[in-house]
Image (tube, rainbow, N blue to C red):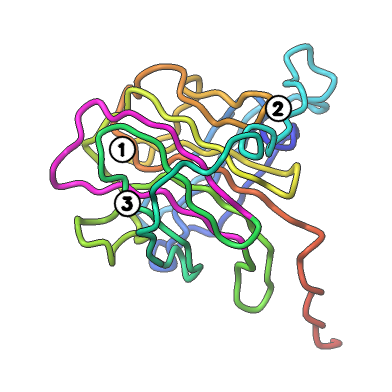
Amino acid sequence: MGMGVNLLSANTHNIIMAMTGSGLFTPEGPAIYHYDSRTKEGRLLLAELIARPRLSLTYPPAINWSLHATSINKFPGQNDTFSGAVRKDIFTFSELKRKAGNYTVCQGDLCCHLDYQMSNKSKDEVYVLGAFDGLHGSTIKYHWQICTLLKCKSTDLDTCGQPVETAQTKFDMFSLSGTFSTSYVFPEVLYSGVQLAPGEFEVLRDGRLRSKHSTSKPLITATLFGRRYEKDPPHPLRPSP
């Protein structure tokens, strides 16, 4: 749904390195995917994809990913941000302290806006809104802009950003947007059990990632991944053979 092209995501299955899944994705949703964090077994995924999705009658219209987020003011009164690491990237987080409301979190050029209502906030679960605008990676670096609503591993805010696989809190609604500096943005919604949620959310033409109805299962994360290709540093020189 981001670039409007087919995406083939291949990973070596290595649960020790948190490499736990792969998939074949189309502009209309996942064709097939597999997630497994418990065994060392691999799996070959096969699916039939449209060769030229742009020619499809159901090809989604272009999205202005920053339109909504740049048209509204920052939601007021959230100065209590803190930092946390997601796979070594330092995010700026703000805890969702109420059952419903709206929040803004900014980092660098990126401001992320969230409007939400939880249906059954669990007392032992903490959710945060996070923003990241910077380089990801060690040897080879990529520039990401990320807005994420995510569940923390525990009620200790120091655990926010650590891997989570299960949740109990459902949402009546959520709407996530950001002031992205790129048109290459990829949405992702994950439910408890690390399950995708095709058909349960939509992306509006003004860049809002929005639930169509109450989440059918508890929510782990809803995220917008933006790629600023033009800000990637030069690829490190490979040694000559």
Q: Secondary structure at mark 2?
A: loop
Left or right of residue 79: residue 30:
right
In depth, the one of 186 and 146 nearer the eye is 146
What type is the residue that disc 1 sits on? Answer: Ser
Q: Which mark is residue 192?
A: 1
Between circles 3 and 1, the one closer to the viewer is: 3
* Residue shown at the point (40%, 42%) measured from the top left: 221
Q: Which mark is residue 95?
A: 3
Q: Residue furthest top?
A: 57
Between discs 3 and 1, the one toward the N terminus: 3
At which x and y percent is residue 70?
Answer: 66, 39
Magenta-tinted stretch = 110-133
Where, by quadrant of the figure, is residue 26 drawn? top right
Between circles 3 and 2, the one closer to the viewer is: 3
The answer to whether residue 156 is above or below residue 101 is: below
Query: For residue 158: magenta?
Result: no
Where, by quadrant of the figure, is residue 136 drawn? bottom right
What type is the residue that disc 3 sits on? Answer: Glu
Q: Secondary structure at mark 1?
A: loop
Between discs 2 and 1, the one toward the N terminus: 2
The answer to whether residue 192 is above or below residue 90 is: above
Measure the alpha-carbon separation of dots 3 and 2: 40 Å
Q: Contact (CB < 8 A) between labels 3 and 2?
A: no
Left or right of residue 226: residue 88:
left
* Residue shown at the point (45%, 39%) measured from the top left: 222
In depth, the one of 90 and 56 nearer the eye is 90
What type is the residue that disc 2 sits on? Answer: Leu
According to the picture, the residue beneath numbered tag 2 turns out to be: 49
Q: In which quadrant is the C terminus drawn?
A: bottom right
Left or right of residue 57: residue 190:
left
At which x and y percent is residue 155?
Answer: 19, 56
